Image (spheres, helix red, strand yellow):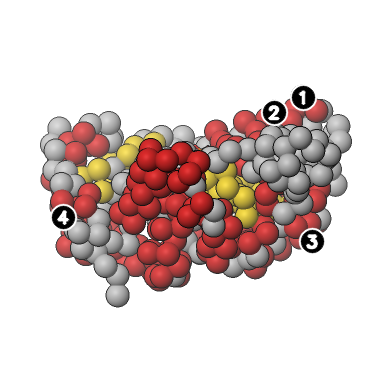
C-alpha cells in the first residue's frame, strides 16, 4: 500500500535515514510545490501571486483534516516555540497561578512557560519516572507519571504543558487519560506535537486538548521553519493577542483602517506575512502522504519496522527503552551498553543516519523504509557496538 520507492524518497539512494525525530529529508511533492511557488515569485513577484491565493485556506482545511477538527481552529506558524509563546504570553494568568510541565521537555515547550514567572506564575515540573511510574534516579530521561501529576496539581493549576512524545526517550503520553484528567479539573492541556504529528494520530477534540503546537520538518517531512498550531475555540477565546501585524485584523487589505478588530478564528495568531512556499509544501505532503495513508496506517507501519529492528538487535550490546503500546512512539531510544558516543559516527559510515540525545541513540524510521532496511540497521548497530 505504501509507496516506498527511491523515486518517491530519493534520500534512500545514499542513506538509511533513521532520524525523523531530528530534521527530515523534505518530502518530494512538498519540495516541488515549494519550488513552483518560488519560481513564480522569482518571475513576477506580486503578479505571480493570484494562482496561490487559495494556499492559506487550503492549508487550514488540510491541517484540519489531519487533526480531525474544523479549519477555523488551525493557524500557520513558523515553529513550535512560536506557537507556545503566542499561547503562554496571551494566557490570562493571575499571580499565583500554576503551570505543570515535565522536567525534560524540549526548550520550545519549557521557556515560553518559564517566561510567565515574571507575571507571578509558578512553573512546576514533573519528575522523571521509570516505565512502572517510579521516580527515577537514572540520568537518561524516560517519562513522567500520572501519580506525580496528581500530586502536583492544585486548585491554582491552569495549564498542563507536555509533549505528546518526549524527544529523548520517545515516551508517548496517553492523551485520552491526560485529557480526561484535565477536563475534570478545568485545566487547559497544551501539547507539543513536534515528535508525534506525522507519525501518531493526534485528534485534540477526542482528548480534550486545548492546543497543539507543531514543527513540520520532523515526522511530517516538511520545510525547516514551518509550523502548525491547533487551538480549540474556547481556549483561543481566552488568549489575548501578543503579536499583531498586517494580517491580524478582519478588515484584511484595508490597511489604513486601523480599527481594532482581530480575527477570532485561527487567523488570530497569523499576525503578518507568512512563507507561502511553506504552505504550498505542507499542502503537497498532506495530500500525497498523510491524508492518503492515514495516521493510523503510518503508525502501525512504523511500529512494525521498529519490531523488525528489535528482533535483530543484540540485547547484550544494546538496551532498548520499551514502553507499553499506548506509550510507544516513532522514536525508539536505544542505550548502547558500552556507551554511544562514537556509535553515531560509526553508523554514519554505513550510511545510517541516527541522532543521539542524553545518551540514547534515537532510532526514528518512517513508513517508507522496509523490513530489510531495519534488519540491516540492527546488524550495523551490533557490529559497530562490538568495536571498542
Ligand atoms: C518535542 C520537541 N518540540 C519541539 C521541537 C522543535 O522546536 P521548534 O519547532 O521550536 O524548533 C523539537 C525538536 O527537536 C522537539 O523534539
Which of the two labelled residues, at mark 2 and mark 3, occupies the earlier sequence position?
A: 2
Q: Position of residue 326 (x, y in %)?
A: 51, 64
Q: Which residue is mark 3?
A: 184
What is the number of the mark on residue 118?
A: 1
Disc 1 packing (10 Å; few <14; some 14–19; many ≥20): few
Q: Residue furthest bottom?
A: 1
- Label 1: state its secondary structure: helix
- Report if the CB atoms under discs 4 and 1 are less than 8 Å apart: no
Label 4 belongs to which residue?
Answer: 376
From the viewer's perspective, is residue 88 above or below residue 151?
above
Examine the rendered structure and indicate whether residue 41 appears above or below residue 183.
above
Which callout, 1 or 3, points at the residue further toward the start of the chain?
Answer: 1
Of callouts 2 and 4, which one flags the residue occurring earlier in the amino acid sequence? 2
Alpha-carbon distance for marks 2 and 4?
45 Å
Tally the numbered discs.
Answer: 4
Residue at image mark 2: 115
**Closer to the observer: label 2 or label 3?**
2
Instruction: Give above or below for 114 relative to 290.
Output: above
Label 4 residue SS: helix
CB within 8 Å, label 1 to label 2: yes
| C-alpha gap between disc 2 and disc 3 | 27 Å
Q: Position of residue 104 (x, y in %)?
A: 54, 37
Closer mark to the observer between disc 2 and disc 4: 2
Amino acid at each position: 500500500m505504501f509507496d516506498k520507492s527511491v523515486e518517491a524518497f530519493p534520500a534512500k539512494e545514499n542513506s538509511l535515514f533513521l532520524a525523523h525525530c531530528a530534521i527530515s529529508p523534505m518530502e518530494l511533492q512538498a519540495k516541488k510545490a515549494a519550488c513552483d511557488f518560488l519560481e513564480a515569485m522569482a518571475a513576477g513577484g506580486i503578479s505571480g501571486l493570484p494562482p496561490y491565493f487559495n494556499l492559506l485556506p487550503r492549508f487550514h482545511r488540510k491541517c484540519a483534516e489531519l487533526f480531525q477538527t474544523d479549519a477555523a481552529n488551525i493557524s500557520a506558524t513558523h515553529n513550535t516555540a512560536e506557537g507556545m509563546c503566542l499561547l503562554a504570553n496571551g494566557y490570562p494568568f493571575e499571580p499565583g497561578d500554576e503551570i505543570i510541565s515535565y522536567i525534560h521537555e524540549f526548550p520550545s515547550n519549557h521557556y515560553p512557560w518559564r517566561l510567565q514567572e515574571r507575571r507571578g506564575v509558578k512553573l512546576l515540573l514533573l519528575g522523571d519516572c521509570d516505565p512502572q511510574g517510579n521516580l527515577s534516579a537514572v540520568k537518561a530521561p524516560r517519562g513522567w507519571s500520572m501519580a506525580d501529576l496528581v500530586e502536583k496539581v492544585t486548585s491554582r493549576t491552569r495549564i498542563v504543558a507536555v509533549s505528546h512524545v518526549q524527544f529523548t526517550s520517545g515516551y508517548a503520553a496517553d492523551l485520552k487519560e491526560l485529557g480526561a484528567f484535565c477536563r475534570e479539573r478545568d485545566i487547559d492541556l497544551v501539547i507539543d506535537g513536534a515528535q508525534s504529528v506525522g507519525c501518531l494520530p493526534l485528534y485534540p477534540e477526542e482528548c480534550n486538548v486545548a492546543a497543539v503546537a507543531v514543527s513540520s520538518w520532523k515526522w511530517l517531512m516538511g520545510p525547516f521553519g514551518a509550523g502548525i498550531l491547533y487551538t480549540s475555540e474556547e481556549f483561543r477565546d481566552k488568549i489575548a493577542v501578543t503579536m499583531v501585524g498586517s494580517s491580524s485584523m478582519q478588515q484584511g487589505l484595508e490597511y489604513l483602517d486601523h480599527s481594532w478588530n482581530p480575527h477570532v478564528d485561527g487567523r488570530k495568531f497569523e499576525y503578518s506575512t507568512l512563507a507561502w512556499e511553506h504552505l504550498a509544501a505542507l499542502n503537497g505532503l498532506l495530500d500525497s502522504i498523510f491524508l492518503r495513508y492515514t495516521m493510523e496506517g503510518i503508525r502501525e507501519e512504523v511500529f512494525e519496522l521498529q519490531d523488525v529492528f528489535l528482533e535483530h538487535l543484540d540485547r547484550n550490546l544494546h538496551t532498548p527503552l520499551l514502553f507499553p503500546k499506548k506509550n510507544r512512539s516513532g522514536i525508539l531510544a536505544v542505550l548502547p551498553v558500552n556507551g554511544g558516543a562514537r556509535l553515531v559516527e560509526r553508523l554514519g559510515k554505513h550510511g545510517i543516519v541516527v541522532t543521539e540525545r542524553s545518551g540514547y541513540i534515537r532510532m526514528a524510521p518512517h513508513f517508507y523504509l522496509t523490513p530489510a532496511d531495519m534488519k540491516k540497521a540492527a546488524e550495523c548497530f551490533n557490529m559497530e557496538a562490538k568495536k571498542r
